[in-house]
Image (spheres, rainbow, N blue to C red):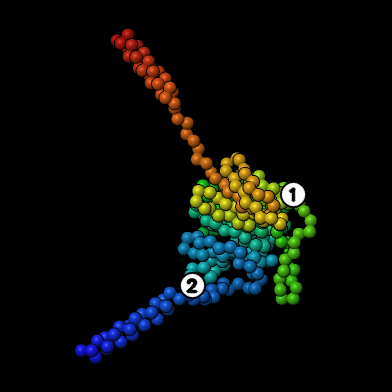
Amino acid sequence: MSIKVKAGVKVLLLTGFLFLILAAGAYGQTWISTNAPWTDDNYSANSMAVYGDYLYMGTGNSGGAQVWQYNGTAWISTNASWTTDNTDALSMAVYGTNLYVGTGNSTTGAEVWQYNGTSWTNVTSTLPWGAGYTDAPSMAVYGGNLYVGIGTELLVGLEVIGSARTRRHRSSLTEEEVIGPQVWQYNGTWNNVSPPWGTDNIDVPSMAVYGANLYVGTYNPSEAAAVAKNKGPHALQVTTGGAQVWQLSVQPTTIPTMTEWGMIILTVLLGAGSIYYLRRRRAAI
């Protein structure tokens, strides 16, 4: 009897051990390379978004930014028809039934392109901002609109030193750099909805929706960090200097309601109108 019990315990322990091994394998992490077949001229994989059944990737390329599509198995090029002045596909977002891509363009200004799954359209063919705004590094969909952060070139030029690529800071200020970065809203037309931040901010590298608000992060080379909050037309600067985070709250439109006296007056007017109508009708008979 005891031999059978010991044998049963051994089988149970062995089964448990095998289960642990299988479970460890099932929940283990495995990284595999899924590189696209692009050339090494694509020096940066800047942006990603899922649109339809595919993953889209935007690159940085001194000969013109590229966009690649991935179906889980293979990559294919779905490049936009932009000029080679657009050297970076910096941001991506899905808005409505289209994919939008924001570019970096130090020659004619940052652009935003729309992709419907078949063809590309430049929705900034008439540039709403100045050509000195060279980057569109952030996008988010919030409150039924597409928001795009634009700024001046944080790092300009591409210097090749040996086999290493490095970037250098801009040495002079443009008019747009003096004005500061901007946030634009798009719903078929463009509107400048920039917060009243200081001109120390140079670019808008990040944007995300959290809860009921849109958050925007800035690039500001000052020393101290800062956090700021914006609700409607009123801004509250919590601290100053350094990178900043701004919050946008779209307040719902308040529908006017009648007061108690308003309801009483409306009721009296409706009643008087009804009496007048009935009297006129009897007189006509």
Name the secondary structure under disc 1: helix
For the residue pair 218 and 20, the one nearer the viewer reads as 20
Residue at (39% x, 77% y) in the render: 23
Q: Which is more N-terminal, label 2 or label 1? A: 2
Q: Which mark is residue 178?
A: 1
Q: Which mark lies nearer to you, 1 or 2?
A: 1
- The amino acid beneath tag 2 is Thr
| Residue found at x 52% / y 41% | 251
Residue 98, numbered label:
none
Where is residue 84, by image quadrant? bottom right
Going by the numbered disc 1, the residue's amino acid type is Val
Residue 228 can be seen in this image: yes
Please, is residue 60 above or below residue 208 in the view?
Answer: below
User: Where is residue 192 drawn, in percent x and y?
Assistant: 63, 45
Q: Residue at 57% of width from left, 47% of height from top?
A: 248
What residue is rendered at 56% in x and 73% in y? 35
Q: Between 30 and 77, which is closer to the camera in this rendering?
A: 30
* Residue 230 percent across, percent down from the top left: 59, 45
Residue 169, how many percent across, how many down? Answer: 75, 61
Q: Residue furthest front?
A: 2
245 vs 153, left or right, is left
Q: Nearer the viewer, residue 80 or 132?
A: 132
State the quadrant of the N terminus. bottom left
Please name the residue that numbered disc 2 is placed on: 73
- Marks 1 and 2 sit apart, C-alpha to C-alpha, by 47 Å
Q: Is residue 283 above or below residue 226?
A: above
